[in-house]
Amino acid sequence: MHSTSLAVPPDPPLTVLWRDAHLIAIHKPAGWLVHRTGLDAGETRFIVQTLRDQLGGQRVHPVHRLDKGTCGVLLLALHADAARAMGEVFQRHAVTKRYLALVRGWAPAAITVDHPLRPDDAPPDAPAQPAQTTFRRLAGFERAEAFDPRFAVTRVSLVEAQPRTGRRHQIRRHLKHLAHPILGDATHGKGPLNRWWAAPERLGHQRLWLHAQALDFVHPLTGEAVALRSGLCWDDAAQRLVVPAGQQGPDDLRHWVALHGVLHEAEVASRST
């Protein structure tokens, strides 16, 4: 008897959002590491190696970081001089970054968190570094189902986050500081609540609900203003997440649009009961 095994389909090519002679922006899929690391030895998908092969052997240099679970806009340099120049832009905090996050509870309408953070790998007596993030609640949703028996409903908020500094896990740690952790955050969130929301009858995905939506800066080598967008947009008029008409986008974007649809239905249902 011959044994058979199901072949794992190859990952689709990384989506290129923008490129010039010096820099390239791609959509980083959730679950991918930017580069190899001994901290996650079992991972096989890496942005740097995959993009290099996709570009025919062109070497690429990451100039900032996104966590493994985060999807969205990731910028890389195409040569060492561009990497150094862009690195200086990030060090000066001369980059405007915007993220979307789905968080526990009813987040504040608008708030700036000024809460210093100590690096994760620093000794306990190391000084904390300044860290500031501005948050704005885009929408709030109630599901007419109780995770916590003390309450009749379960609430979540969609928020926009704009970090002013670039500390590791800054958005995730600042939202935990506000007692509104990101859904799916295994490190800074609530495990039982994450698993409850990830069930097929609710969100249906076990993942970190954090998305790098926008990156704006002045190009250090050309002087041009660069505005990078993931393709996922918040429509104020329709009060929902959308992907522009005619743009397919990666699976991550469709997950987010579908997510908002699930939450919108839950909100309508809860209001009608």
Image (cartoon, rainbow, N blue to C red):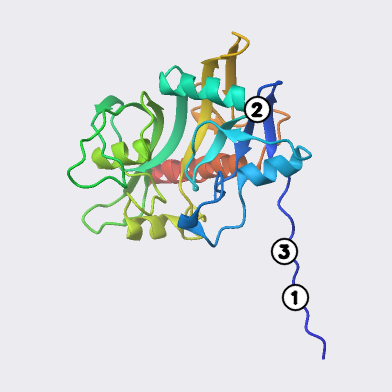
Most extreme residue toward the top is 223
- Bin the neighbour count of mark 1 within 10 Å (Cα to Cα): few under 14, some 14-19, many 20 and up: few
Amino acid identity at mark 3: Val
Secondary structure found at label 3: loop
How many angstroms separate mark 1 from mark 2 (CA)?
Answer: 42 Å
Total residue callouts = 3
Q: Position of residue 251 (x, y in %)?
A: 64, 45
**First-in-chain label (3 vs 2):** 3
Q: Which residue is mark 1?
A: 5
Discs 3/2, front: 2
How many angstroms separate mark 3 from mark 1 (CA)?
Answer: 9 Å
Front residue of 267/271: it is 267
Q: Which mark is residue 259?
A: none
Residue at the location (62% across, 44% down)? 47
Q: In the visual, does 178 lie left or right of 11?
A: left
Can you tell which quarter of the image residue 82 is in?
Answer: top right
Q: Which mark is residue 8?
A: 3
Is residue 222 something one can see in this rendering? Answer: yes
Residue at the location (42% across, 51% down)? 184
Q: In the visual, does 39 lie left or right of 85?
A: left
Q: Is residue 44 above or below residue 170?
A: below
Q: Position of residue 62 (x, y in %)?
A: 56, 35
Amino acid identity at mark 2: His
